[in-house]
Amino acid sequence: MLHIGWRNRSKPEDHRYRLWREEWGDSFLVRTFLQVFLLQGFLVLVISLPVTWALTHNGPPFRSLDAVGFSLWLLGFLFEAIGDFQLLQFKSNPANKGRIMTSGLWRYTRHPNYFGEVTLWWGIFIICCSVPGSYWTVVGPLTITHLILKVSGTPMLEKRFADNPEYAGYVHNTSAFFPLPPKK
């Protein structure tokens, strides 16, 4: 959250919100409340179900499954943080304006920050699996995975750069989500 706030300080309004305001006209406030705030609140509730379940039910002390989950969470956290940092550094160089980031973690996946976000939520779910009766909370990481892969994450970004020839080459050579060696 801090990263997003810092990154967007003194920038113009997000283009998606501006577009919605123009499309929705007089119903903008009501639709924003329902489609942005209430919907996002509900999704946060669903995604965080493993945490909520674990915090409200007693579980055993630390187990090996917790170590696996923490390792996965840490991998996701590092991917997201490092990917965001690398992109911030890249964008801060005026020579990169209009260019596509293709180095660092971005060499192995077109969306290291999205991969990190999804991975850390799966790690949290695995940690919470130590709590009896928690397996049904898999709906949380499934939801964030679906949202990022099929709804608001990669599809929106990929569409935004669809007409960019540099991005087309990047798409051809770089994994969309899972970090893999680039194609030759």
Image: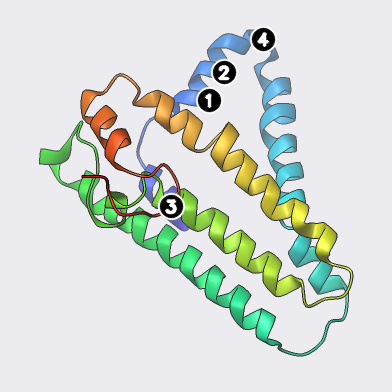
Which residue is identified by label 1?
17
Q: Nearer the viewer, residue 118 or 20?
A: 118
Which residue is identified by label 3?
113
Q: Amino acid at mark 3?
A: Asn
Which residue is identified by label 4?
26
For image coordinates 62% across by 74% down, the residue present is 69
Residues at discs 1 and 2 in contact (Cβ within 8 Å): yes
Quick check: 65 above or below 112? below
Image coords of residue 90 (percent x, y): 21, 48
Q: Residues within 10 Å of mark 2 (few under 14, many from 20)?
A: few
Quick check: 14 above or below 74? above
The single residue placed furthest to the left in the displayed view is 95
Q: What secondary structure is found at the residue carrying circle 2? A: helix
Q: What secondary structure is found at the residue carrying circle 4? A: helix
Q: Amino acid at mark 2?
A: Trp
Q: Identify the mark at residue 20; answer none if there is no mark.
A: 2
Q: Quadrant of residue 11?
A: top left
